[in-house]
Image (cartoon, rainbow, N blue to C red):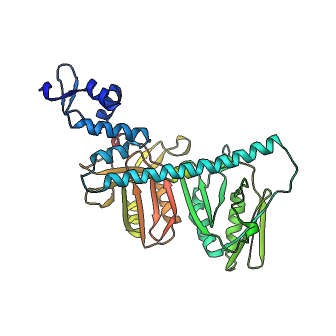
Amino acid sequence: MESDLRSIGALARDSGLSVSTLRFYDGADVLTPAWVDPQTGYRWYRPRQLADARLLCRLRRVGLPLAGIRAVLGADSGSGAAHRVVDAHLRRLEDGLADARRELSLIRALIDQRENPVTTTPTELRFTVPAGELAAALDAVRFAVGGDPELPVLAGVLFDLDGALLRLVATDRYRMALAEVPVRGASPAEEPATEGLPAGAIVPTALVDGIRALLGAGGEEAELTLGGGLVRVETGGHRIEGATPDHDYPDYRSLIRLDPVHRVGLPAAELRGAVESGATRTLPSGPHGAACEVTVLALGQDGRLTVAPADTAAAPGEVRVAVNRDFLLEALRAAGRPEQLVLELTGPIAPLAIRSADRDGTFSILMPIRVPDLG
């Protein structure tokens, strides 16, 4: 039999992968040998597996995650699935490069300020947004604001101006919520793309709640002013303003570039009811290790999403992910009352994303909870 097969050493030499790497991908069920010697444990591969090994080597070089590599090598010929995985990864890399350029631009501005300190009047950014959409965006992210006194940078909502969008971001490290609001009415002098100018501010929680109350006054538009350590909101003849902390908010952009293997649409009321009445497990996985109720979502091979019964093994081909039940319910409530939701999931150790079907830029991300029998 060995004469028809290629040894692991030969495959490593001809593919560019090390022997230890080939062993890893065997254990991960990505590139399994055709035969393993029962006496020595030595791995042997079919000649045609050399092409897969060489492809795997190049996928590793471009940083494709394990789930993506598995999807490419397991894709049906002619389905286009492998190309879609690679295209999605390329978009992530391009987005990452754009983020790096943005950060380097700010770094250069900070270096210039450090080397050539001058006294200047802080520049303000002034722009207008629909008041109702800003209120809805605050409602969509408020639940995820951090409350840990040791992490004051998370005790508020990031107002991040990105071109023609105002993006609101909140996180407590266990979940993240984002919402987008269209910006309008900015004059060229107030254009937010000024090079080297910070285009965002962390708005403290109390001020966020004050802004939300002000937006309920009924004004159609809200004028926002960011800069100089202050944020100001004016609408309907009323105004609120307050100081913004001098903190650097964590870079959220890399965290929201999900590459889900599965996207599932389902009625919002159906999912909410299933979570409220479904089985849970109690695990020490809450903030600071506190015990919390955990909901396990299961996606069957038929594409149907359910809440898995407690202490049951996954069915063949079933994908499961465990999340904090209270966090999941809060995310569902924060989504408003859409008729349809879209859930994005990959597996037990990947984040779960929850989107409204009609508001793609507004969504929540829940960090998974590791349950031993989920993988």
Residue displayed at 44% across by 41% down: 63
Q: Position of residue 18 (x, y in %)?
A: 35, 27
Q: Is residue 55 visible?
A: yes
Q: Position of residue 256 (x, y in %)?
A: 51, 53
Q: Is residue 29 visible?
A: no
Report the residue that reaches farthest toward the front: 14
Q: Position of residue 7 (x, y in %)?
A: 22, 25
- Name the residue nearer the viewer: 73 or 171: 73
* Mark count: 0
Residue displayed at 41% across by 57% down: 344
Q: Position of residue 212 (x, y in %)?
A: 67, 69
Q: Quadrant of the N terminus?
A: top left
Residue displayed at 70% across by 49% down: 106
In the image, residue 38 sits, relative to residue 57, either above or below, namely above
- Name the residue nearer the viewer: 117 or 355: 117
Which of the 4 image quadrants contains residue 219?
bottom right
Q: Quadrant of the C terminus?
A: top left
Which of the 4 image quadrants contains residue 217?
bottom right
Report the residue that reaches farthest toward the top: 40
In the image, residue 85 sits, relative to residue 142, either above or below, namely above
- Name the residue nearer the viewer: 216 or 109: 109
Tell whether 247 sits left or right of 358. Answer: right
Tell whether 272 sits left or right of 217. Answer: left
Report the residue that reaches farthest toward the right: 119
